[in-house]
Amino acid sequence: MFPALALLLSVIAITKIAPTAQSVLLAMTVAYGAGLIFVGVRSRSRRVLAWPDYHILRSGIVFGLPVTLAALAASVAINAPRFMVEQQLGIAAAGLFAVFFGLGLRVASGVVMLVSAGAYPLAARKMEAGGTDAGHQQLAKNIAVLAMILFPAVAGFIAVAPSFALLFLPEAFQEMARTLLPLAALFGLLRYARSHSTDQVFLLHGHSEVSMRLSILELMLITGLSATGIAFWGIGGAFVGAVCAALICGVISVVIARWRFGFVFPVSPVLRCALAACGMLLALQFVPTAQTLPAFLLTIAVGALIYGVCLTLACLPMLALSTLQSLWRRGEVW
């Protein structure tokens, strides 16, 4: 609710006060300040002056400090390419990079929170109540659900990127957006899929330092590969370097989760979702570029329908096997 309020107040501030960054920041500060007050009142908490419990404080530092450092490293990693683009290609190129990179990232980050906000606490509760196997099984289900909505969202955005650029971006940006928006969305998929899937295995087992090390490695890889990409391919190379770094860290995360913590990645359901999303992406290539907003929304609806059909076809063998097993247990199959 409060991010939506921040957006609304920002629009009002731009139109009624001044079209400046200061107006937007002021509006967002008011919205999030109201949110902080709202949460404080709703929680009905009281401040109690007392010495903190040593064991709680120690556990919080041991677990929370690596998480904080991991978040800091991730934030620097996401923003580092923009500063390298600015240093090597100038402020105008940095502005282009920031626009395209931010749009692509928001697609993935917004979608993952639809699942992860409630899914991770559920996995933690299952692990606390039923042990490691129960926690791992719930996390595997969470990953399957995440793949079911994340893959089509990113694939759909890549498919409609030309239409999006035509309708919502200035003419000078449109040609470059056709290439850079898909790369930014792909980076967002790889980066947030890792942080909201196998990285959570480390948190479930209380080894937050593994996430911290992976985030630091990601920072180093993004910095090095993006700098190399910029030197060879300009602004597009920064996107390619970020994608390669996210892919490498994702593979390392899956391997560590499997061999150190025994987590079995749900390959089959994730692969089915990926195939269905690719089928939708290929089918949408035959749809003409939308010239109007109604046509753009219709393209999105068609893509969702195609994804549903493709996902059903991809899951038919599994559904058929499950049905046969059920009938066999009831004695209806000889």
Image: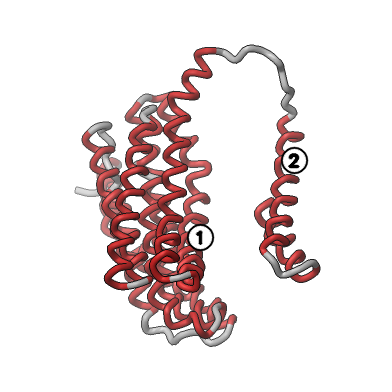
**Residue 191, visible in the rendered structure:** yes
Where 334 sits versus 280, above or below? above
User: Residue 52: image x %, image y %?
Assistant: 60, 15
Name the one closer to the observer, 74 or 306: 74
Residue at position x 34%, y 59% in the image: 242
| Residue pointed to by mark 2 | 38
Name the one closer to the observer, 238 or 259: 238
**Residue 304, visible in the rendered structure:** no
Q: Looking at numbered disc 1 in the image, what kind of residue is underneath it?
A: Arg
- Label 1 and label 2: CA atoms lie apart by 26 Å
Tag 2, which secondary structure? Answer: helix
Badge 2: residue crowd in 10 Å (few <14, some 14–19, many ≥20): few
Q: Looking at numbered disc 2 in the image, what kind of residue is underneath it?
A: Phe
Left or right: residue 75 versus residue 36 is: left
Where 189 sits versus 52, above or below? below
| Residue pointed to by mark 1 | 106
Q: Quadrant of residue 211?
A: top left
Tag 1, which secondary structure? Answer: helix
Contact between marks 1 and 2 (CB within 8 A): the answer is no
User: Residue 200: image x %, image y %?
Assistant: 39, 38
Residue at position x 67%, y 63% in the image: 21
User: Residue 252: image x %, image y %?
Assistant: 25, 45
Left or right: residue 244 versus residue 150 is: left
User: Residue 216: image x %, image y %?
Assistant: 35, 43
Extreme right residue here? 16
